[in-house]
Amino acid sequence: MEYVVIAVALLVLLIVGAVAYVVPKRRRELPPSVPGTTGTEVLERPPTPAVEPEAEPEVEPGLVEPPAVVEPEPAVETPPAPVIETPEPTAGRLTRLRARLSRSQNSLGRGLLALLSRDKLDDDTWDEVEESLIRADVGVGPTQELVERLRTQARVLGTGSADELRKLLAEELTNALEPSLDRSLTATAEGRPAVVLVVGVNGSGKTTTCGKIGRVLVADGRTVMFGAADTFRAAAAEQLATWAGRVGAEVVRGPEGGDPAAVAFDAVKRGIETRVDTVVIDTAGRLQNKIGLMDELGKVKRVVERHGPVDETLLVLDATTGQNGLEQARVFTEVVNVTGVVLTKLDGTAKGGIVIAVQRKLGIPVKLVGLGEGPDDLAPFEPAQFVEALLATDA
């Protein structure tokens, strides 16, 4: 019996020892975490690391459109309506601008009056009168004729007082300006717009004069269309558009360096469509000795005449150029048949006699004169008022 007890005790010790040996070994071999492991023992797992959010995949440009950002629409500012100006009436402009002729009065007006007011009108005095007129650009031929008539009148009529001599001088100067010449502008035509072609050399103020001519026509109740056929000077079309906008007129223009004749043609066509009274066409400034350019000016006139005749061709002359303006005028008349002269910058010269010289040599009337830089300082030329302004003692 003791042997049995001892055997059982030894067996129990063997079993306990075996279990103590096997269980730790198995515990070392098992992985930290085996999904689905069953058993009474709970295996401790290592702490789970914090899971960082996955970065969004990069999207190649153009594959996915980003969400539209709705921004508030900016307030639209309505541009102010252009201010349409009302040009000053043309009637009496020359009289209102008489003070602008003060420089011309020095030689052509007051200078002559001072000479004729001397107590004795001898040969030396008349020679001085002649020199004064020549310096004023009246020209040699017209001056000799004018002085001869004055001497005859003074001698025959026995005129001696300053007032009488002033009246006599005014009459002779007015006659020299040929008041019978037609100085009106042809601003309307039957069934179509009247076409006014404006020509002249560089630097004469031609484009500005075009704008002022438009104001003269608007002041007289006409509707106007402008043609910017000076395509070789970049600022010319913009300058003309500025003048047109001030009187509510339209401008037809072409590409820079384009065909001037095509622009002029389109301007007249547009004028016919809109039924305006007058189409004023600005042309490129040209030197009179450039044959190719002068031929081009002739082309402009011929192309425009497909719509109808050119009613006016106005030559813009700078009064400060003096006798040189006569040669310019002569060549232009051979190309385009000038119908009238616009004499600019007359307020800036002491040589107002150029008005007489131009008319006497060319037989072309001076129709408009520029007496300042203001928009309405272009005045219809009236010989009697012009002479009165020259001889005025209160200007």
Image: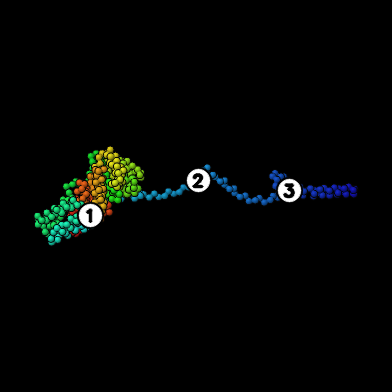
Mark 1 or mark 2, whichever is nearer to me: 1
Pointer 3: residues within 10 angstroms few (<14), some, or many (20+)?
few
Pointer 1: residues within 10 angstroms few (<14), some, or many (20+)?
many
Name which of mark 1 and mark 3 comes first in the sequence. 3
Callout 1: SS: loop
Callout 3, which amino acid? Answer: Glu
Q: Which residue is mark 3?
A: 41
Residue 151 point in image, percent of width and height: 13, 55
Give the CA separation, mark 1 to mark 2: 76 Å
The residue lying toward the viewer, choosing from 208 and 323, is: 323
Give the CA separation, mark 2 to mark 3: 55 Å
Q: Which quadrant of the figure contains the C terminus?
A: bottom left
In the picture, measured across the screen, residue 289 lies left or right of residue 150, that is: right
Which mark, residue 67?
Answer: 2
Residue 339 point in image, percent of width and height: 23, 45
Mark 2 or mark 3, whichever is nearer to me: 2
- Taking the spot 26% from the left edge, 53% from the top edge, the residue there is 320
Mark 1 or mark 3, whichever is nearer to me: 1
Name which of mark 1 and mark 2 comes first in the sequence. 2
- Taking the spot 30% from the left edge, 49% from the top edge, the residue there is 202
The residue lying toward the viewer, choosing from 70 and 174, is: 174
- Taking the spot 28% from the left edge, 50% from the top edge, the residue there is 204
Callout 1, which amino acid? Answer: Lys
Callout 3: SS: loop
The residue lying toward the viewer, choosing from 394 and 47, is: 394
Callout 2, which amino acid? Answer: Pro
Q: Which residue is mark 1?
A: 351
Q: Is residue 373 visible?
A: yes
> Do the residues bearing badges 2 and 3 touch, measured as CB atoms within 8 Å?
no
Residue 255 point in image, percent of width and height: 36, 44
Res 197 quadrant in image: top left
